Structure formats: C-alpha cells, structure tokens
Image (cartoon, helix red, strand yellow):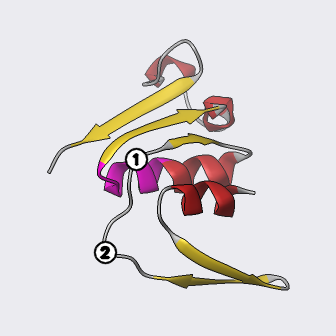
Amino acid sequence: MHVGELMRMGAVVKIEGSRAIVRGVRKLRGAPVMATDLRASASLVLAGLAAEGRTDLTRVYHIDRGTSRSKRSYQPSGRISLETKD
C-alpha cells in the first residue's frame, strides 16, 4: 500500500505480480501521506526527507515499535511534518 503513497510524492513504480520496478526520478515532492506499517513509515520518512516541500505523514504510531517513547520526535497528534527547502 505504501507504493501508492510514494507515487503520490512523484515516485515512478510499476507493479508486476509480486515485483515492484522502480524508475529513478530527479525529485520527489512533498505530499500528505499515510503509513500502514513499520516499513512504510520508514520509507515515507526517508522519502519525505529527500522530497522538496512539505510532507505530512500520518499514522506514525508504527514507529513507536522498537523505539524509546522518551525520544519521540513527532507531534502528539500522531503526525510527522517534514519540510525541506531548496
């Protein structure tokens, strides 16, 4: 499901059966996206950091697994907002 979220950010991904073929793009763009599991959370955080503009990532409670709650760096609303500038 997170492939669709990455595509919303400008990634070019073609699904063929159980394979995903990813074509590189020059730039990703910020977008509102939603995490569905721990791997999706990680990939969307990384994509958001690489993207131009603002990325709002929701359903980030998956990141809590395996991390110390005392080091939480996202908003209490359960959202991470990332903004990059040129």
Q: Amino acid at mark 2?
A: Arg
Is 46 one of the magenta-colored residues?
A: yes
Name the residue that disc number 2 marks.
Answer: 26
Q: Quadrant of residue 84?
A: top left
Q: Please say if 51 is above or below 27.
A: above
Q: Residue furthest right?
A: 17
Image coordinates of residue 54 in percent, x first then y, are: 36, 38
Residues at badges 1 and 2 in contact (C-beta under 8 Å)? no
Is 54 one of the magenta-colored residues?
A: no
Name the residue that disc number 1 marks.
Answer: 30
Q: Which quarter of the rendered picture does the N terminus lie within?
A: bottom right
Q: Residue at 34%, 54% (x, y): give it.
A: 51
Image coordinates of residue 23 in percent, x first then y, are: 50, 84
Q: Please say if 23 is above or below 38.
A: below
Rendered image: mark on residue 50: none
Q: Quadrant of residue 22?
A: bottom right
Cα distance between the residues tagged 1 and 2: 14 Å
Residue span colored magenta: 45-52
Q: Quadrant of residue 13?
A: bottom right
Report the front residue among 76 and 82: 82
